[in-house]
Image (cartoon, helix red, strand yellow):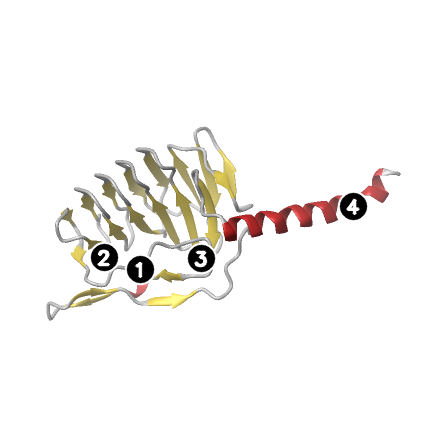
Amino acid sequence: MSRTDMRPLKKLLASATMATACLFVDSHPALAASIGVNGTTLIFTADAGSDVITATAAPGATDVLITGLSPTILTSDCVPEGIGVRCGLAGIDLLAILGSSGDDVLIGIDVLNHLNLFLSGGGGDDVLLGGNGDDILKGGLGDDVMLGGPGINVCFDASDIRLDCTLGNVEPPDPTLQVSEVPEPATLLLVASGMGAYVARRRRRNPRLPR
């Protein structure tokens, strides 16, 4: 069989592999670090250890570098780079970095472009450092420290140490790589009457995984 004749077969095998990967991700929660896309949200999920995850994006940058772990890549927008991954941001406006059961440090202070951040510590005693945008910070279980940064930020967990953020009272779920309601930081409504900060959500009806 010539190489030309093999092209349709290669495309068929690639499609079958992609479909199998989608089924696996939909039915199995990520056990190791991973990165993928849901709608306009780029989602980095850490492993079960105590991790230091750093996101970096210069002003006006059209990509973001995330270092600290080498994740399983579930989107064609990302490529490995050192101990980390670099991802293009076409159509992306929210970067979610999700910790796990360890004592995690999630650092977004060098995210200086258009990205808003969703940082979730999970279990453990975590440190969450927001970026330049309007960020959501969730300490989770444990004794956590959350610093929002210069944007309009909302923090969750009244018992934690918080700076540069408003305490929210309607805690949003973590974004997932499946169909879910992804929080929309740009539509945060800060209520001056003392009712706290509410998070408006919009349903992502057409998540792309992989993209």
Q: Residue furthest bottom?
A: 193
Residue shown at 88% from the left, 38% from the top = 2
What residue is shown at x 52% (from left), y 49% (from top)? 25
Q: Amino acid at mark 1?
A: Pro
In the picture, the disc for residue 40 is 3
C-alpha gap between disc 4 and disc 2? 51 Å
Quick check: 37 left or right of 21? left
Q: Nearer the viewer, residue 47 or 39?
A: 47
Check whether the beta carbons of the residues at disc 2 and disc 3 lie within 8 A of each other: no
The CA span between labels 1 and 2 is 9 Å
Of callouts 4 and 3, which one flags the residue occurring earlier in the amino acid sequence?
Answer: 4
In the image, what residue type sits under mark 2? Ile
Circle 1 is placed at which residue position?
A: 185
Element marked by disc 3: loop
Residues at marks 1 and 4, CA–CA distance in whole angstroms: 44 Å
In this picture, residue 49 sits left or right of residue 159: right
The residue carrying mark 4 is 9
Residue found 28% across the figure and 53% down from its top: 135
